[in-house]
Image: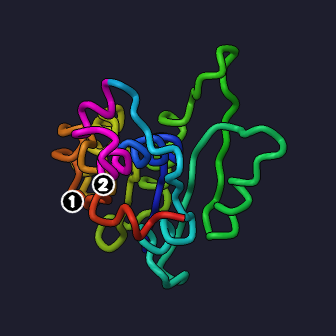
Amino acid sequence: MEYVYVDNSNLFIEGRRVSAVAKGMARNIVEAMQYNILDHTYTIDFGKLHLFVAGSDPAKIARAALFGSRPPPNDSIWTFAKRAGFEVILTDRNVRNKEKKVDTGITTAMVKDGYKLVDPKKDVITLVAGDGDFVPAIDALKADGYTVELVFWDHASAELKRAASKFISLNKHLGILAH
């Protein structure tokens, strides 16, 4: 079975940076990050993302959870994610409109599911995120025999990529995942 946990904002924003580099708007990812250069036309197709990270056989998908911040009431992005097969888990932004609790929510769900539902001998936990905050959770799961794959853009935290059982780059799939 496959257990998938996606940090939507991290995936989306960093995908816009990768697309900006691919389109020549920035020379490299470092420049795109340093000067906050984003391709604002790039969006991710949730159906294609779901197929890519969870596969096409619903019988093999135990959970595909997409984490993010509560959008304005007229934003339909989460409806599309649900239609694509994701369980959508939203948190409120703080008073400064900053996203909070997403990484800890993903970590909690991933570890809780790992120890309650996942069979470490045959199931795979897949994380779609790029920052190093997830390293302790991956280290703990791997130490107990779990397979934890990381799917993200090439510029994911080097420490996170090393911690994962396997790293799968999204960079070469930039166009395939686009909406």
Residue at x 48% of width, y 52% of height = 6
Q: Is residue 149 visible?
A: no
Which residue lies under the disc numbered 2? 150
Which residue is disc 1 drawn over?
A: 166
Q: Do labels 1 and 2 touch, CB within 8 Å?
A: yes
29 w.r.t. 179: above or below: above
Residue that extends furthest to the top in the rendered view of this protein: 96
Does the segment drawn in magenta span residue 16?
no
Q: Position of residue 137 (x, y in %)?
A: 34, 40
Drawn side of residue 132 relative to residue 74, left or right: left
Q: Quadrant of the C terminus?
A: bottom right
Q: Quadrant of the N terminus?
A: bottom left
Please say if 3 is above or below 105: below
Residue 70 vs residue 120, the one in the foreground: 70
In reply to whether residue 21 is colored magenta, the answer given is: yes
Question: Does dot 2 land on a helix, a strand or a loop?
Answer: strand
Is 125 placed above or below 25 here? below
- Dot 1 or dot 2: first in sequence order is 2
Rendered residue at 69%/63% (across/down): 80
Callout 2 amino acid:
Leu
Identify the residue at horizontal 48%, vertical 35% (top origin). 103
Amino acid beneath label 1:
Lys
Is 1 situated left or right of 84 in this image?
left
- Within-10-Å neighbours for mark 2: few <14, some 14–19, many 20+: many
Q: Position of residue 167 (x, y in %)?
A: 23, 57
Name the residue located 45 percent from the left edge and 49 percent from the top edge: 110
Region of the chain picked out in magenta, as a range? 18-34
Classify residue 71 as left or right of residue 165. right
The quarter of the picture where residue 146 lies is bottom left
